[in-house]
Image (cartoon, rainbow, N blue to C red):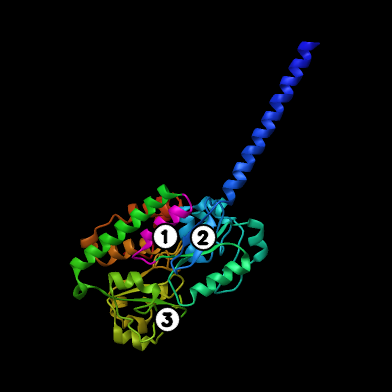
Amino acid sequence: MKKKLISLLLILCLSITSLVGCSSSNDEKEKESKKTIKFTDSVGREVEIPSNIEKIAPSGSLAQIVLFSVAPDKLVGLSGEWSEDSKDYIDKKYTELPIFGQFYGKGDLNMEALAAAEPQLIIDIGEKKDGMKEDLDSIQEQTGIPTIFVEATTANMSDCYTTLGKILNVEDDAKILADYCKITYDSTVETMEKIGDKNKVNLVYCLGDTGTNVIAKGSFHSEIINLLANNVADLKEPSSKGDGNEVSLEQLYIWNPDVIIFAPQSLYSQVGNQSEWQKLKAISSGKYYEAPSIPYNWMGFPPSVNRYMGMIWLSETLYPEEFNYDLQEKTKEFYKLFYHADLSDERYNELTKNAIK
């Protein structure tokens, strides 16, 4: 009887110890989740953010691309849906994330979906603009969620990844992407310096239903064009919007570029048979191309890390002897690193069918 009593007491003691241990462990986890650090973002705002971040929300499409590339499993929602074509490339678990909408711009934010997903941090990424501090403060106040901005241009994308690596605790993955961006950008700049401004190809990027909207020199969307070519669409007031500046066909005749890049779903397939377009040197000589666009336009629409793929493609297209890339190999590498996608030969050929001649 005494032995049974002692055994019961031992079991009881062990159970209590186990419960105390579990409680202590849960308390530690709760304390850890509540720890915060102070972060100064790219517009100088000091924001208190969690030290251990597992759930993030992108403020818009630019941020979505970058965050998907570096920390896809921390995304708890999207700013916008993936295109139907993209779903052949992107894993289903990412395409089926809830849609929050954009936090500014379109003004289509779904607060209900945001609240249900419980992100710990909202991240905005892209071009630094006037009035951003107030906009970011407004988002933070409206949602009750810490909100930060990380600047990202073509020149400093590697710094953006380094910053994200630190705050999201994904430094190893971020370093791979940061190094890729730095090496690609630096080597492109170096080669273009050897080519020289005088030897740059005259180029125009055309978009819109009539093909007569252009991405003007000096706009945020024109960074790759300005780096790799002489962007002859030099206008007094370059539009900062993705649909560019509207011009006339007569203005295109005046510029008469050596090469024209058409946006996806533009007039690429029609211009070869239209006499008014045949008057342009680029069309009559066959030096016109359509930018690949799955899952995102390579020329930077939206103007995010997808521009690095455009940088490689345009470099090889305009200056094949100087760059001499294996474009298929480079494309597969980029898609694996930034989109977590294994690109088959068949999909590569479909993707680039109007981009290579």
- The amino acid pointed to by label 2 is Asp
Kindly tell me whether residue 339 is visible in this rendering: no
Q: As displayed, is residue 130 above or below residue 328?
A: below
Of 339 and 57, nearer the camera is 57
On screen, residue 318 versus residue 130, left or right, reads: left
Q: Residue at x 35, y 71 (%)?
A: 223
- Is 168 in the magenta? yes
Q: Which residue is mark 1?
A: 351
The percent position of residue 149, horizontal first and vertical second, equals 48, 65
Q: As displayed, is residue 133 above or below residue 279?
A: above
Nearer-N-terminus badge (3/2):
2
- The amino acid pointed to by label 3 is Ser
Main secondary structure type of the part rendered in magenta: helix
Nearer-N-terminus badge (3/1):
3
On screen, residue 213 versus residue 139, left or right, reads: left
Q: Which residue is mark 2?
A: 85
Q: Secondary structure at mark 3?
A: loop
Tag shown at residue 239 = 3
